[in-house]
């Protein structure tokens, strides 16, 4: 990542272990779990596509900035059944 990307993600460019790591678990009862550690004072937006060929990413939810780092476990209940989804976490939070 570039220094700008590290700054926006709230990670330390001097620490190779400090990364924005997003984990997506397989759907359980039609819900995907999107998990990552949100850094202090950094807002995030979660977006998805149902196919990589889709022209644009669709807004799923926002994670507003909080005063301290915290674990995020967001459940996407909109996917339903056997829908495959591609997710991305964007920072700073999108308008």
Image (spheres, rainbow, N blue to C red):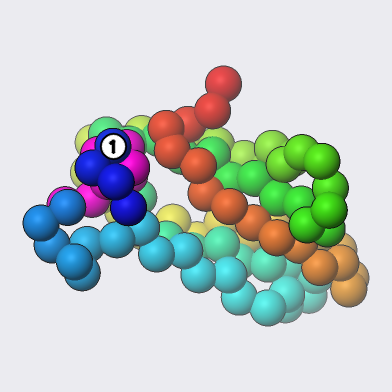
Q: Secondary structure at mark 1?
A: helix
Is 68 on the left-hand or right-hand side of 25?
A: left
- Residue at image coords 86%, 67%: 83
Is 28 on the left-hand or right-hand side of 36?
A: right
- Residue at image coords 62%, 40%: 61
- Residue at image coords 32%, 52%: 1
* Part of the protein shown in magenta: 5-12
Q: Examine the structure image and report whether residue 11 is included in the region drawn in magenta.
A: yes
Which residue is labeled 1 in the image? 4
User: Residue 46's x, y, as percent?
Assistant: 58, 45
Q: Is residue 19 positioned above or below 55 on the image?
A: below
Q: To which quarter of the image does residue 57 belong?
A: top right
User: Residue 86's x, y, as percent?
Assistant: 70, 60
Query: Observer-nearest residue: 15 or 1?
Result: 1
Q: Examine the structure image and report whether residue 29 is included in the region drawn in magenta.
A: no
Q: Is residue 94 positioned above or below 83 on the image?
A: above
User: Residue 24's x, y, as percent?
Assistant: 58, 70
Query: Observer-nearest residue: 34 or 29?
Result: 34
Q: Is residue 53 positioned above or below 81 on the image?
A: above
Is 89 on the left-hand or right-hand side of 40?
A: right
- Quadrant of the drawing holding the C terminus: top right
């Amino acid at each position: 990542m570039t220094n700008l990307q590290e700054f926006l993600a709230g990670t330390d460019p001097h620490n190779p272990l400090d990364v924005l790591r997003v984990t997506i678990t397989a759907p359980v009862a039609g819900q995907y779990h999107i998990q990552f550690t949100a850094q202090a004072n950094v807002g995030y937006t979660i977006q998805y596509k149902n196919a990589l060929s889709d022209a644009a990413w669709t807004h799923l939810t926002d994670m507003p900035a909080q005063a301290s780092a915290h674990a995020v476990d967001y459940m996407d209940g909109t996917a339903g059944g056997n829908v495959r989804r591609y997710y991305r976490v964007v920072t700073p939070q999108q308008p």
